[in-house]
Amino acid sequence: MPKPKSKLPKPLRPKGKSLPDCRVYVGDCRELLPQIPECAKGQVDLVFADPPFNWARSYDKWDDSMPDKEYCDVTQSFGRPGDVTAFTQRWIDLCIQALKPTGSLWINIPDDWAAEIVVHLKQRGMHMVNWCVWHYRFGQNTTSRFINSKVHVLYFCKDPKNRTWNPGEVLEPSDRATTYFDPRTMDKKDGMPAGMRLPMDVWYGQYWGRIQGNNAERRGNHDNQLPELYLARVVRATSNEGDLVLDPFTGSGTTAVASTALGRRYVGCEYSPDMAKSAMERVNKGPVRDLRAPAQATAIFKPRRRRPEA
């Protein structure tokens, strides 16, 4: 386990004076999180983490090719948190420690490690709310197996009966209303507005694909950048304005951009000084999308013709 540094480095901040508090500390999150005051005191409302996948990808200065046992060792999930040395189990334990009792933790992770992370979270007393999937159409081409077109979106909380949950913030038009014209959806008894529903646990739609090529959201040197709408959904649904959002792997800055644009405070860690600087520049510019815009319908079939009036 890395030894904590004796002094917390000065954080990077965006230059925009009208923005909520936004800070990024440069260094290894395993060393930084115990020193960040809000994290050490358990004052974080929402954690979102998109960690390195250990795929030997280029992440500037980060070594993305650890031995598996160093990257993620599920056997350590059955011991005491303080004894953990594996990278994945260590940063997760520190994020759990940083959360308020009402807080939520989201992890974006591929097939390789999803099961191990779920086991670890449950062993640490966290409660699964949803195991979602982010689906995209342009997976990396291969001829040796089926093409991967998804990443797991794990949503856990400390207390399922006392968590921040804002369903009205993320409603979308129902297929029953937009495609099948089912009158029952216009007279629902579940408290949701007529014709609207919560998103399903497979996430897709316009502007929800991989950020690549000439996409307006694209940042240079980031091949694992998440869509702004993805983070907007997480932030709006599971935090309130003024809350504190933590991202231990700031990367391209999508979590920071979405959080500050939606009136949340943000604190993050980033191993690369250059990436941290780039992320703060992005926060200054703000999001490409309107993150408060009503969600679009995600029906995959064309609308059926209405039945003739009787």
Image: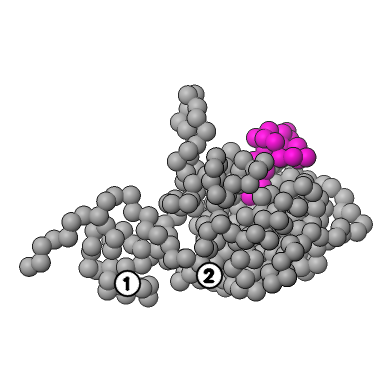
Q: How packed is label 1: few (under 14 Cα within 10 Å), some, or many (20 or more)?
A: some
Looking at the image, which is closer to me, 123 or 35? 35
In this figure, which residue is indicated by the disc labeled 1?
A: 194
In this figure, which residue is indicated by the disc labeled 2?
A: 165
Give the residue drawn at x 67%, y 56%: 282
Residue 56 in magenta stretch: yes
Question: What is the x, y in percent for residue 293?
Answer: 47, 65
Give the residue drawn at x 49%, y 46%: 209
Proximity of marks 2 and 1: CB atoms separated by less than 8 Å: no
* Colouring scheme, one of rainbow, by chain, secondary structure, one colour: one colour
Q: Is residue 172 visible?
A: yes
Give the residue drawn at x 70%, y 54%: 279
Q: Is mark 2 on a helix, strand or loop?
A: loop
Q: Which mark is residue 290?
A: none
Residue type beneath disc 2: Trp
Question: What is the x, y in percent for residue 57?
Answer: 67, 35
Question: What is the x, y in percent for residue 70?
Answer: 74, 39
Q: Which badge, 2 or 1, comes first in the chain's sequence? A: 2
155 on left or right of 247: left
Q: What secondary structure predominates along the stretch shown in magenta?
A: loop
Residue type beneath disc 1: Ala
Magenta-tinted stretch: 50-67
